[in-house]
Amino acid sequence: MNPKAMKSDSGTIAPLIAIYLALILLVVLGTSAVGVSLIAKNRILGVTDSAVLFGHDQSVVRGIPQEGALGAQVEIFLESAPSAKRIQLVSARSWVQGEKSSLELCARFINLFGVGISSGVICATSSAQSFIVED
């Protein structure tokens, strides 16, 4: 057998290991970003729930919420509540339909990895309804 005819398969696996490490890092970062988004959604939804309940409770006259008072009370809540101060508010829209108050709150969430100023806007909608109990 001719020794020059035999091919040498001595090489390095460093590129393969680098690719595997990059894939693992990409999966971990992607999973973390999804987790942060879900936590941010829950935080914004919690603030929305609290704001609409506060606004509804403060604006109800004989079981019917007043639209102007609802908006004003929601603004008071969003300016004063510690939970609302931890989100970056983009917009808040409240409305009344009969005995039901609703609030749509949109806020920015901060990216876990600090890439850019913010990662996006999340909107949440909550409602509260009056029930009149007669004696």
Image (spheres, helix red, strand yellow):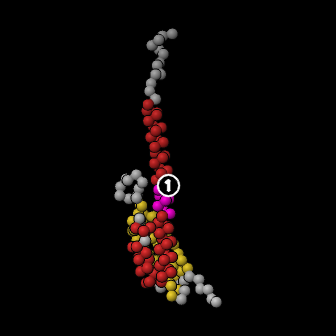
Q: Farthest right residue?
A: 135
**Residue interval drawn in magenta:** 35-42
Residue at image location 47% in from the left, 11% down from the top? 3
Q: Residue at x 54, y 80 (%)?
A: 100
The answer to which of 79 and 69 lies nearer the viewer is: 79
Q: Residue furthest left?
A: 117
Can residue 96 be seen from the camera position used here? no
Residue 87: x, y in percent? 41, 65
**Residue pushed farthest top?**
1
Q: Quadrant of residue 78?
A: bottom left
Q: Is residue 56 above or below residue 16?
A: below
**Percent coordinates x, y for residue 12 in the rendering:** 44, 27
Magenta residue check for 39 = yes
Q: Is residue 120 magenta?
A: no
On screen, residue 49 above or below 11: below
The residue located at (40%, 71%) in the rendering is 91
Mark 1 falls on what kind of element? helix
x then y, percent, for residue 65: 50, 84
Disc 1 marks a residue whose amino acid type is Gly
Q: Which residue is mark 1?
A: 35
Which of the pair 18/132 is nearer the observer?
A: 132
Quarter placement of the C terminus: bottom right
Q: Is residue 93 above or below residue 121?
A: below
Q: Residue 56 in the image: state x and y as whole percent.
A: 50, 80
Magenta stretch, main secondary structure class:
helix
Q: Is residue 18 visible?
A: yes
Q: Using a 10 Å C-alpha cutoff, classify the residue at mark 1 as few (fewer than 14 neighbours), some (14 to 19) or many (20 or more).
A: few
Q: Is residue 78 above or below residue 122?
A: below
Quadrant assignment, res 108:
bottom left
Question: Which residue is pictured at 37% across the width and 53% down the height?
Answer: 115
The mark total stands at 1
